[in-house]
Amino acid sequence: MKLHEKIRVRRSLHDVQRDYEAGNKKELDNLMRAWKGVKELPADDPNSFFMIGGYHGEPFRGAGWGNAAYWGGYCNHGNVLFPTWHRIYLLRLEEALQSIAGCGDVMLPFWDETNEESLKNGIPWALTNEKYELDGVEIDNPLRSFTFPKNIVDNISNDVVDYSKPKGYETVRYPLSGLVGPSDIENTIEHNAQFPDYDTNVKILNENIVNWLNSYIVVDGKKILTNVNQKYIDSLYAPNFTVFSNTTSSAEWNDNLPDGEKPVVALESPHNSIHLAVGGCDIPGYDRSPIDGANGDMGENDTAGLDPIFYFHHANVDRVFWLWQKKHGFTDKLEIMAEYPGTNTVDSQGPTPGMAPNSWLTMESPLNPFKKNDGKSYTSLDAINIETQMGYTYGKGSLEEYTTNGLLAAKEEKGESKVLKISRINRGPIKGSFMINAFAMIDGKKQHIGTEAILSRWNVQYCANCQTHIEVKAFIEIPSVASKTLKAKEAVDSSDIVVEVNGRNGFFMSNEAGKMEKSALPAGNQGGFKVEII
């Protein structure tokens, strides 16, 4: 991989679109040309999209190809390498785009998920339009989807048919399903037949994105934000890199919060929410029926990296990482809390190819499979300052006002917070990613106060490491104006708080009377999960 002599700028995709609409088409044209080029390269070409997109998850490799003790992709989730691994990953993809003839100046724009346009309309049109005119010829929009040039198979699962995908498979997003194995294909055909019109599907997708970004409740006439936009803002106030970086570390931190402190939000949390929003989960609490059975590729670690929208989403995640660094004075140094939860290769997902089980993660851990010019592996030490070390920076975008230390997070309510702790959720029998949704009985009405999105692999039951990290916890802030009516310092029941776990195929279980389960609760969940106000 190479570094550039001058600092280049990753701009907001909305700004690139505005230039295009004003007649300055070169930047977007070249971006489309580069993406078209990498997608058309042979599958085994080092710069092909299939090769680079497959680094994240499937097709699995190394020990993870057939060993349940490993995660078969290179991506790091649920551990402290999450931000830096993905930072290098984007650089590698960008380099591939620049390798296409005439595209040497192409940079990867970011989808500014928290600007006014996204909050109002959802996903930028460049990522969803079905067609694009390039050099006078109408082509399939290369940012809309990806068609697999080879089969992918999950060799870990005993029921591999569930998440294997054949050559010729085209990635899908909400509201469609992408499960095409023999045991699922009939259900998928029936499900997708309900959504035959592409433009209508994009409208449904954008409505879902807008709902995730803007959810709120009203208490005593006050608007209380419960959305992904607010989570991004709150993540900027995480006190150190370890808890900012990943959900495993932030859960440990939140489990030991002093009285009255707000829970820490890891950057990985709103990141997970966008994956599920694009991939196939409704945010609860809206007056429309949820779409059960939506199983888009962005919603699972297995295939998320093979949808082009992944990289525009992650460019924004990387930008928020940079904003956090600037806010806290960590542009040239990052520190990891030694031997803290989230700093071991077995935390959450399991070791990636080239990493030993049960080894501690540090700033010097290799970020496989990425190599520097000297042949040595990139480490997090190479991915701290994006400008001086990596040769790029970000153009103007939302949330920049929160990088000043004196500015409080934009919440309407003030005063002491209470935190909802949800524990003892067994993720073992839940296929794929899922949501933990919390509702409070406020002003005599059941109101949605928060969601924690759990981005997971498709088959946890066949993942040996997952079985040793089977419990999922969530910490959701209860707005102070709402918490005054709730019990404190004790377990609560559904008269105060209702918690629902919703999987990709709909409702799974709840603590609400008469609604405990969809099927028999698994071992470790008898009596349901535990709900506390701390």
Image: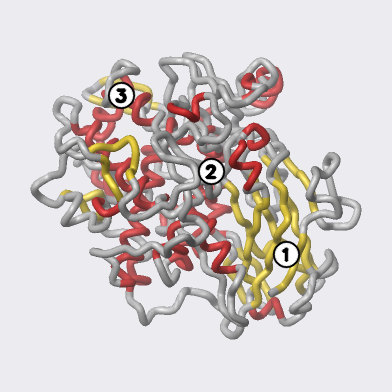
Dot 3 falls on a residue whose secondary structure is loop
Residue 514 drawn at (x, y percent): 91, 52
Q: Which residue is mark 3?
A: 48
Crowd band around label 3 with a 10 angstrom C-alpha radius: few (<14), some (14–19), many (20+): many
Of pointers 2 and 1, the one earlier in the residue sequence: 2
Q: Nearer the viewer, residue 374 or 129?
A: 374
Of pointers 3 and 2, the one earlier in the residue sequence: 3
Q: Is residue 227 visible?
A: yes
Residue at 20% in and 39% down: 372
Dot 1 falls on a residue whose secondary structure is strand
Residue at 61% in and 64% down: 216
Q: Residue furthest bottom?
A: 415
In the displayed structure, does residue 508 sit left or right of residue 98? Answer: right
Residue at 41% in and 40% down: 355
Q: Which residue is mark 1?
A: 447
Of pointers 1 and 3, the one earlier in the residue sequence: 3
Residue 316 drawn at (x, y percent): 37, 51
In the displayed structure, does residue 23 sit left or right of residue 429? Answer: left
Q: Nearer the viewer, residue 130 or 352?
A: 352
Q: Quadrant of the rendered structure where residue 518 is?
A: top right
Quarter of the picture containing the C terminus is: bottom right
Dot 2 falls on a residue whose secondary structure is loop
Residue 65 drawn at (x, y percent): 50, 25
Residue 446 drawn at (x, y percent): 77, 64
Name above or below for residue 387 compared with residue 44.
below
Q: Quadrant of the rendered structure where residue 422 is?
A: bottom right
* Structural distance between the alpha carbons of marks 1 and 3: 47 Å
Q: Which mark is residue 349?
A: 2
Q: Is residue 120 visible?
A: no
